[in-house]
Amino acid sequence: MSTLFDVLWDDRSVFEAGLLDDQEDILNRLDGASVYHLELNIDPDMTHLAGREEVRYTNTEDAPLTEIYFHLFPNILDGSSKVTNLRVNNRPVEGQLSNRNSALQVPLAAPLKVGESVVVTLDFSVKVPTEAGATYGAFSCLDNILALPHAYPMIAVYDDEGWNIEVPPTYGDVVYADTSFYLARVIAPSDLTIIASGVEIETEEDAGTQTVTFAAGPMRDFYLAASNDYVVTSQIVDGTLINSYAPPDVSDSAEQALEYVVDAVNTFNYRVGPYPFTELDLLATPTTAGGIEYPGAIVVALSLYQNPNDFFELATAHETAHQWFYSAVGSDQVDDPWLDESLTQYATWMYFREVYGEQGGAQFERQMNDFWRGASDTNIPIGLPVAAYSDSDYGSIVYGKGPIFFNTLAETMGEDAFDAFLRDYYQSYRWGISTPEALKTLAEEHCGCNLTPLFEEWVFGEG
């Protein structure tokens, strides 16, 4: 049993509140998913975080493991993270840092056999940057808004390449993660509005301090944000409470952004499959990226709220679509960014067609073609790792050419076959990890056709 929470590791009933009634069956599956118990203490200055973590990790691979790796993402996001009091099954161990102090190796006293579990406990402290820096202010305290994505030590993915601990380029997404379950206790000044992945299950206040507990799962990350300047407006769609948080001086834009998310959730629920959770949060933050996706949370740049334009809607719809492709259907965002970004961009195209008809779809197609033409070489395939692209080509190819590929795939397969494929893809791979080969194989099953030439031309660059 955890020492942070009076709950058994296998007791998933606490996560029922965050799932729609017809989605709770997932709690009976996902055997071996990691379970995180977190305590996060936000300092009044909002630039320091002290944490305690207990995580049960189960070896679901096909061979024994002699070590476990954790990501310390703040160390590559312009901040810092330090780990102390590291223990495995309550025995002290000495961890080893590598990769710009972003990877923590935790040695195991004996090989962890397939199906066996260990509990890793640790304390950690985090310093939060107060400038946007080179990482778009994704992890920052700016304009009285604290944004804390993946601020805790996170277990890396182990796959056919081994432990994925490389330092990714920060112009792409940095997180490749397995689905896990999170119980998180957040301690913070009472004047802060606390927003997090999952749902709030308990709140206490005492002498100017609040303690808020969140249950989140199944999710690939735990996002946390706080501000004493947020106001919220909400709507319910198909049983999901959608909250829009923003400063009061951009309340009109916050209402509009909420409408965008409502329309997007309606579109993707119908075209792809049901959003499984009872809550979805939209936040305005000072990020210099247009928007950023997190499980159960959508971040859109405050600058777009202040000066709304056409990109405001595109960014909001795009980040909403990531709740289906990234949050639910996982993939290697570092080595195969097209699997979630290009498909999410295509889903955004679906949104514009659904909301604005063929004229809206045609305008989006022109924008994507213009974006693609901005690449240094339009023949660059979409299926490369992030690091294989320059910063500008990454956007032009993955976000511009990528959705054009998926539209070509839909035309090749036929509309009915493609729509059935997309729904099947979502149902088959949500909570798991998809691969380029898996997507291609499933598409071929639905169309009864050979898609190798198409994929070689557009994705793999072998045509």
Image (cartoon, helix red, strand yellow):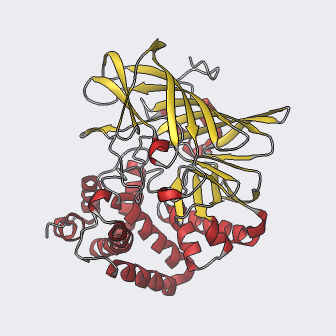
Up the image or down, 63 lies above or below 426; here it is above
Left or right placement of residue 340 versus residue 79 in this view: left
Residue 415: name its quadrant: bottom left
| Residue 123: percent from left, percent from top | 55, 26
Camera-side residue of 195 and 272: 195
Residue 220 in view? no
Residue lying at the far bottom of the rendered structure: 359
Residue located at (14% from left, 66% from top): 462
Residue located at (39% from left, 44% from top): 432
Camera-side residue of 40 and 398: 40
Up the image or down, 383 lies above or below 188; here it is below
Residue located at (70% from left, 71% from top): 253
Up the image or down, 125 lies above or below 374; here it is above
Of the 4 image quadrants, the one containing the C terminus is bottom left
Of the 4 image quadrants, the one containing the N terminus is top right
Residue 163: name its quadrant: top left
Residue lying at the far top of the rendered structure: 91
Left or right placement of residue 1 versus residue 371 in this view: right
| Residue 178: percent from left, percent from top | 41, 40
Residue 199 in view? yes
| Residue 340: percent from left, percent from top | 39, 58
Q: How many marks?
A: 0
Up the image or down, 136 lies above or below 34; here it is below
